[in-house]
Image (cartoon, rainbow, N blue to C red):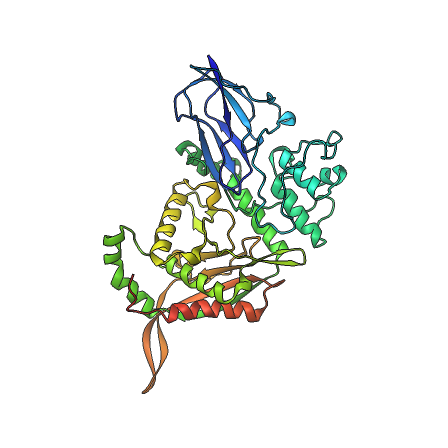
Amino acid sequence: MAQYELRLPKMGESVAEATIIKWVKQVGDMIHLDDTVLEIATDKVDSEVPSPVSGKLISQLCQVDDVVQVGAVIALIETEGGDVALAPETVSATPDSVTTAPAATPDTGDIPGMSALSSAVSASDAPDFSSATRFYSPLVKSIASQENISINELDQIKGSGAEGRLTKDDLLQYLAQRSTGLASNGKASSSVAATPVNPAPAMAPAAQNRTENSATTVASMSGTDEIIEMDRMRKLIADHMVMSKQTSPHVTSFVEADVTNLVKWRDKVKSSFEKRENEKITFTPIFIEAVSRAIKDFPMINVSVNGTQIIRKKDINIGMAAALPSGNLIVPVIKNADQLNLVGLTKAVNDLAGRARSSKLKPDETQNGTFTLTNVGSFGNVMGTPIINQPQVAILAVGAIKKKPAVIETEFGDVIAIRHMMFLSLSYDHRVVDGALGGSFVRRVADYLESWDINREL
């Protein structure tokens, strides 16, 4: 007999850790190839960890709610065949002794207040954490060492993890607020990882049901009122929204656009496009194309803030807010959207939206967005004032397209006609985006939509 080390799989370049939320297999259970052994969570995305071998589970090296680094050994499986090396060191099932062997260099993404991390510090260079009053993951220790945070200061930072554990995102948000003078004695608000989230297998139906059902569990009842406990995703969203409002002074600019030509063009091509590409073309990829073009015209919208530094992004990664069947929200990201044509954008939008609704997004597919689009018109709303998706500095809401009487200038004078009209609203961070830039950007997006070529070929 031999033992196989089951390690936490790589879940994308931007993800260095995950939280164990459920052991599907228990010690002594037989496991077949590709059976799900446990379920993990990375920010908003729940995923399964399948077994690459068949055998018997003989040891669980981590507990539920433990935060584990990518590459760490999480279980031992007894298999038939030749010898397989054991884990370099056995990890205790108690959270205080969870150590993470071979992990990728952590990628902190574009989070304000955090300098780029180099390779994890060696044990000889790291500060002595023996005096710490609570457990810290290796990634948190590495960040603290890089940023010269003392143990006493670290112990005072409020944690949002299980049993008050300090997560990577708590520490990064603390650093961001400290750089602007807002953090003191652990009062920094916690945030959602910026990506929001990095490839793991799809979430099991059981995990999906657990997430959805937990949002409607009645914790207690008083008279005719119910108290409903938030599920994990709702808590993350709540923290992220509060943090964004505390971080950025929000300003919103509005523009009304005449998209009649765009609507007529889509009506003309949608049937032939679906037959040819086996994809339905919605307005969303069209909006994303217009946003990408406008960002190239106004690149200072595509930035993030690090203290007093403005970081201009080279890549144009557009997040699109998607409502989930559970009522929660997730923002999958189309990477390098400016490099895709309309057919490519349509396929990317449909793929991400479909997998978001079925809880099959990979963690990395919600990470590293540089600008976000939300379609409030899909719910019949004509406009909205969205909250910025940190660490970005702007988010565009597109409203419902409505037929309205409008004044049109012609060579024979002004006339009133029935036109397809819509509102666009841009919320932006007034620390770095003033009205001239914010207003000009949303106007440029509208211009691209209004000037749509009704004879455009796909």
Examine the rendered structure and indicate whether residue 452 appears above or below residue 201. below
Residue at 39%, 62% (x, y): give it: 400
- Depth check: give the residue in front, 433 or 403: 433
Which quadrant of the structure image shows residue 122?
A: top right
Q: Can I make out residue 123 in this image?
A: yes
- Depth check: give the residue in front, 411 or 238: 411
Examine the rendered structure and indicate whether residue 194 appears above or below residue 96. below
Q: Position of residue 407 (x, y in %)?
A: 37, 79
Residue at 38%, 70% (x, y): give it: 450
Which quadrant of the structure image shows residue 124?
A: top right
Residue 167 horizontal side relative to residue 322, left or right: right
- Depth check: give the residue in front, 6 or 152: 6
Q: Position of residue 50 (x, y in %)?
A: 43, 28
Q: Position of residue 378 (x, y in %)?
A: 39, 56
Residue at 67%, 46% (x, y): give it: 174
Examine the rendered structure and indicate whether residue 171 appears above or below residue 316. above
Q: Position of residue 291 (x, y in %)?
A: 45, 62
> Which quarter shows the C terminus?
bottom left
